Amino acid sequence: MRHSITTKILIIIAAVLVISDASLLILGFFSVFTTTHNNYVSYAKSSATIAADLLDGADMQRLQTDETYAKYYTATLDDLCQINDLEYLYVYIPDTENKTITYVMLICSENSSYSAIDERSSGTVVKHELTPAEISVMNGNENAGITETNNKFGCVITCHSAVYDKNGNVTALVGADVSIDETINVFVKSYSIMATAIIVSCSFVLGMVAVILKIKVLKPAKIISKNMKGFVTDRNYKFKKLEIKGNDEFANMADSFNYMAEKIENYIKNINELTEEKHRREAEISIAKNIQSGLLPDRSFKNKSIKISATMIPARDVGGDFYDYFTLTDNKICTVIADVSGKGISAALFMSRAITIIRQYAQLGYSPSEILFNTNNCLTLNNPEQIFITVFVGIYDINTRIFTYANAGHNTPYLISNTLKKLDAARGITTGIFENEKYDEVSVTLNNGDTVFMYTDGVNEAVNTEREFFGINRLENTLKTFRNEKKENCIELVLNEVRNFSQNSVQSDDITMLSFSICSNSETTINADTTNLNVIKKLITDDKYIPNKLKNKLFLVAEEIFVNICLYAYENNSGTVDFSIEVSDKIVMKFCDSGKKFNPLKNLTDIDSYDIDSQIGGLGRLIALSIADKADYKYKKNRNILTITKYFQEE
């Protein structure tokens, strides 16, 4: 134990006992002193009074001269002096006129420290002025008067009493001296005994308390503390039940600890079992997640006619949303997005079943409405949990640029062209509930640069910290700005907006999006000769999907880059240039050559300090790159690759 409980308790008890002892000693000091003082004064008073009563009517002159006569009184007075422990007991005759006193008799105690026999012997006359106490006694005002003096005979307390004759006249005074030093000695002796008794008794009490505390408190406390420490810090410690006998708090504490330890042991055992089960489940979920990821195609796909982007962010480890795209015969591409009711493993299992069925019917050459019809009938069978799926299926014909789609209760996709349009003409009920449901099928012709955007309700139903939904309006406003935003695809734009809106809110549903954009791709390989500039110009000007207001700017950029390659990349125009232009939701021009390594994005001319009269070159490259929205340079496999991107933003 860090600090013994017994030590703490003993310190407190000792402090209390010390304070109590000090108080008792202080009170005892005054009590004993007062008692001792009063006792000695009482002895002196009674002695003086008794002696005076004995001497009443005695002949004072005869007492001085007749030893036989005086002997009777002397023996009695001597006994009185010894019994009451007086310093002196004496009889004297006062003379108030001459201020003298004449000693008649003197009795001295055996323990007296001063000898006054010579100076107070019978018949001795000494100068003495009566004290107020003596005068009061002579006048009969009090029976015994007290005087305290400090003289050559010591510090004494004297009690006076008057001796009367038969006529009631005062014939003499009796003085009884008590030594103050003796009183103090008696007090010190009595007080020392009392103080010793108090200290010894308190020490005995403290010792007994220490023994009792050690047996009744410290021992069980150490046992409980040791077991608790071992139980907490050392899990290999073999716990044994505490055996604390009795019905006190420690016994109750031991019983409580035994109960608690048993419960904790069981709890830890259960936790270990649950942890093992959790790890096993996590491993299974991880496998399920990998399987689900394996069922989905890549997040991006591109050929000469179409660019596809997709994402699926589950609310849990595995989700019920899915997207899919795959090529069909006759130069067609099938795109699918779906949302399974529920979340987690059950939704993921049903999702994998739905993907397989949809792919099967699509590969057989069925139309979107036929795919949904047959998929619905398959899912309806053996569906005891009544799980349903909303599905949107679209097939794009690259040759005709016709997009045919059908919708089974899914969120309405959007067509992003010069305007934003909902693809809401096709309607149908969700799959997996009722058999033989019919689904509408609609076709739309897509132009170069058009983008179809599909999504699940995890997008529009995303919530922020104020419990507000992202909503359809925000989604549509975001899509309307897509052509003006310098983003690779609309999925990136929407996902950023959703995340900014949601902030730190927990994702409540799976977020899945798929988009594809129609594009044209023209490419050529020409000799690095400026006379071939017309070939590049024709590719740009003949593309009907490039706005006329952009064609001149694009040609200006292409001209500057191509001419520079011709003049500086090769010697004697001996090399070639690969040029391509891709038009989708943006325009991308790419220049590739195997000439000298040169990064045109570095060491650009500073337009603010450019002197048109003295400087030669550099300005054209600066102007060309300023027209581009994005420029990227790579040197790969001994080839310079420069990519110029221009967005369809408003002029």
Image (spheres, rainbow, N blue to C red):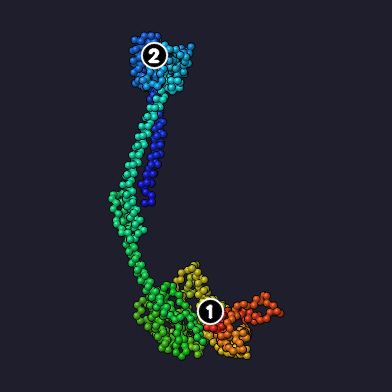
Q: Which residue is drawn at 56% across and 80% down?
A: 633
Three-letter code, disc 1: Glu
In the picture as drawn, the residue positioned furthest to the front comes out as: 571
Q: Which residue is drawn at 39% across and 27% down?
A: 185
Disc on res. 105: 2
Q: Mark 1 points at which residue?
A: 488
Occupied quadrant, residue 294: bottom left
The image shows residue 462, relative to residue 89, as above or below, that is below
Three-letter code, disc 2: Met
Occupied quadrant, residue 259: bottom left
Q: Which residue is drawn at 38% across and 71% down?
A: 282
Left or right of 640, for residue 606: right
* Local secondary structure at mark 2: strand
Task: Please provide percent x and percent y for residue 592.
Answer: 56, 85
Label 1: how many Cα within 10 Å (few below 14, some 14–19, many 20+): few
Look at discs 2 and 1 and give the one toward the viewer: 2
Task: Please provide percent x and percent y for residue 338.
Answer: 44, 79
Q: Which residue is drawn at 50% across and 84% down?
A: 302
**Count of numbered marks:** 2
Task: Please provide percent x and percent y for residue 587.
Answer: 57, 83
